[in-house]
Image (cartoon, grey):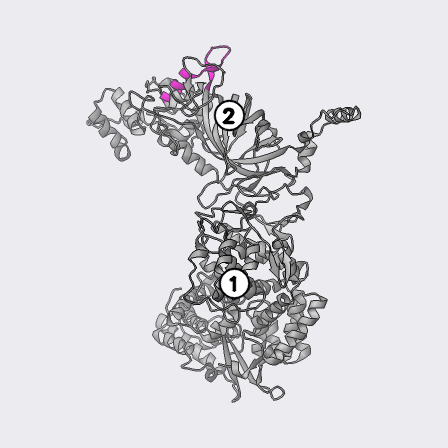
Amino acid sequence: MLRPESLQRRKVTWPGILVVLSLTFLGITLFPLHVLAEETRGYVVSMVHTATYYDELTCPNGTNGSRPDVLIRRVMADGYDREEAIRIVSGIRANGGRDDDGNLVGSAIVLGGGASFSGDQSWNGFDFNPANVPSVLPDPNAHNAQGRYMLGLNLDGEAGPNSWEHPVTGETGIDNEMWRVLGCWDVYYVNKPVNPYNEGIAWDTAVDAMPAWLISITGDDLDQDGEVTVTFDRALNIPLRDAYGSIMSGASFAVDPNPRSHSEFKGQISDGVLTIEPGDFYLQGESQFYPHLQFSGTQLRFELKDDGSMAGHIGGYQPWRDYYHYLSVRGETDGMIDLIGIFYDMKKYADAIPDPDTGQNMAISAAYFMEAVPAFHVDEGGNLLADSVGPGPKFSGPAVSQYSNNEQ
Amino acid sequence: MNIRISILTKLICIALVFGLIPTRVLAAENSADEQITFVRLTSDQYRNAIRDIFGESIQVSGNAASTGVREAGLMAVGGRRLTLSAAEVETYEVLALDIASQVLSPSRRATLIPCQPRDESAADNTCASTFIESVGLHLFRRPLSKPEIETYAAMAATATESLGDFYAGLQSALVGMMVAPDFLFRIERSVSNPEQPGMRRLDAWSRASRLSFFLWDTTPNPALLEAARNGDLLFEDGLIQQVDQMMGSARIEDGLRAFFADMLAFDRFDTLDIDTNLFPKFTKNVEDEAREQTLRTISHHLLNNNADYRDLFDSRETFLTPALAALYGVPIPIRQELGGRVPWVAYTYPEDHVRVGLLGQATFLSLFSHPGASSPTLRGKAVREHLLCQTIPPPPGDVDFSLVRDGNHPDLKTVRDRLTQHRENPTCAGCHMLMDPIGLALEIFDASGVYRTMENGETIDTSGQWAGQEYVDVRELATLLKDDPTLTSCLIQRAYNYGTAREPSRAEVQWLNATHTQLRDEGVHWRELMQRISKNPDFYTVPEAATN
């Protein structure tokens, strides 16, 4: 395959040239030619959401239900019996949620979205929103996920008492404490092909307006096992949809030159599975759920598929306040969770990056499902950076000079 | 204003349409020798005429014209066979009501009505007649006769008296004119020509219409109508002057687009149904963009570059949108901004790229495919019929196609294998030998235009023979095709027939052959061809046999 000139330029550095010249002069060609024949394949992320998995061991005491259950429990915590609590919650839209004596209860149990939520931020007669200051309310002690199996990655290289076993690969030491927080909420208590409702809807809405997230893989021969370089970038343009509403493969994306959303990892392809060495990851988003996505100690495990796409899990230690923020912006109505409970559980299960003053862990191990389809990456000048390699014939990267700057 | 025309008006209109009141009876200047022919306006011509008469702000919602019929390879020729059904008249009436209410809305009266009534609640025959005479010239593409003006003025007066609103009355008259055959049809008036027995000459007004719809796909502009009124169009120098002026206008692109949309059978887009379960990239947007890609490519090539028509078949230059680029599997520069218009980008395929010319575009590839599979036969037939003006007879009624359609056949894995087997039936072989080799070269493109190299695990063989010469792929086929004189003679013939909406006479065939011989040597350039046809006196004739 012809490699774009721009990529060749990127790899050939002056020290590299000197080494080659020296070795050639000595008649020892130790510098393998295939290094210069690397290929780069481009992808666009076509779906991302919190990894979910459940079996009969996940929530042995039942799930936490959904938003009505949250509200009913809050009313019951004020001393009402279940039947009256149900009547109060059922009447929220009609009368604001009043008890049998006409007392207004609803205003004390309904939280607006927090943070950047633009609606009514008042609560129970006060001019503030507990979603922004969740510690003012008591921990509702929601059920947390248990059991043996969960999707994710072994972030610390160890198999400890809190780690999971991967249900597909059997790998032990899976670190995913965020699943303990989320796993017993009904909207997360799903298995593929069902997506977690809140994030699935948010992603489906966002992709038509959000600059795409891009992945590239560079290596000597990406159809074979070997070492690779994996990059993540943000695009300047949004994805296209195909007739299924899925992200269209083979489209072109201009890579945002802003380095803020550029992450690069050493990686490996082995038996059609892509993995990376741990590192920091940051992607800016414009979704109503992901203003950004960031991890430290990032790892991934993507299966490379015959149709050119890849799918798997990416994870790392994520600032848990990020995720709480995502949920609070969406609010309890969209999120179908108890924001207060999530706050306390995130804080409790956070397992990395302790605050030097308080000792409170600020990050939580997490895993996200991610899927990507082939895409061309170009720079702002139209130069090809990565080929789209899907099913069927493989096109060579076209010469840079073929582009015309004439827009009609 | 929202009124409906009276039953009487409707009856008059329907009577006009069905010829119960011959139009020429209403016209003042009929000679005993005059004969008329009809060509129904296409929906685009209707739309363009309204735009040019009343302005771009008038919305034409809906499409009143039913799909026409293709005759001698062109919908334009079939347009001479079209009449109007009662249902279509109703549809045109609804459309006319909507347009008339816009034209006569208070905000537009000052610019579109040349006078003001003495009293807006009473009839004003003078003002109504002024409007009718003025707008009638453009709608009917000829001056209205006195009886016609009186008829429509009376219609306006009756409605005004009934509704108590001058403009409502005027709306009634305007609707009446817009559902009259003089507007919905190109009515060509001709007289006998002593110098050319068997051929009749068009009058000046009919010449203006023929020329305008041919070059601009719209109604004659004021300058052309003035040239008709002066009789300039009846003389060579006056005609040449008008043609030259029209050829210098950007509107020549409208005419080019309309012609190629007809010649390349874009009417098939109306019923195109590529199965998106099988070809998910072929969305409705992609379909629309593919259509535009083809017209944009042709227009740029023939008008902007003034390049040879033949080069359209192996040209690597085209225009792409992000979605089309994804369909074709090529990268393009991205300038897309959120919420912006579809960003078209000029694009040139690399030298060794297999996708060249019009035959490599999704328009041709999808229009001549089955919903779920490509069809070498349909594609080959399309090349023969639409590009080479050849006729392939329909298959016999008792042919068994099951083998050809069996995409899961255990032994005959490729469509080439199955068609080869099919051609062993001597009844089928004759026609399939003409069609299949062309289409098989295009088998590397599926029904949606996506590139592929394999079919059921077998490598697709694109080789074949054209006029005794072998080719290995579609690129070599394109080179052979563009060198075939039939390609250019077909274009010239179709362009001429498109303008006259009929097949040529014997004398015209001789002129076409001579023109073809010259242009093949000099280059088949669109502007030159249009000029030659438009300035040919025979172009403004009608054979005796063609008159209705």
Residue B49 visible: yes
Q: Is residue A357 magenta?
A: yes
* Mark 1 vs mark 2: in front: 1
Q: Residues within 10 Å of mark 1 (few under 14, many from 20)?
A: many
Q: Quadrant of residue B231?
A: bottom right
Q: Secondary structure at mark 1?
A: helix
A161 on left or right of B417: left
Q: On the rendered image, what quadrant is the N terminus of chain B found in?
A: bottom left
Foreground pick, B519 / B278: B278
Which residue matches tag 1? B432
Image disc number at residue A300: 2
- Alpha-carbon distance for marks 1 and 2? 55 Å
- Look at the image and tell me whether residue B220 can be seen: no
Q: Position of residue A234 (x, y in %)?
A: 56, 33
Front residue of A377/A346: it is A377
Residue B274, position as x, y percentages in the image = 46, 53
Q: Residues within 10 Å of mark 2 (few under 14, many from 20)?
A: many
* Whether residue A336 is situated above or below residue B259 in the rendered picture: above
Q: Position of residue A248 (x, y in %)?
A: 50, 42
Q: State which chain disc 1 sits on.
A: B
On the image, the x and y values in percent for residue A43 come to 54, 35
Q: Nearer the viewer, residue B381 or B92?
A: B381
Quick check: is B255 in the magenta stretch? Answer: no
Please tell me in which quadrant of the rendered image residue A225 appears: top right
- For the point 60% across and 75% down, the residue is B226
- The front one of A277 and A90 is A277
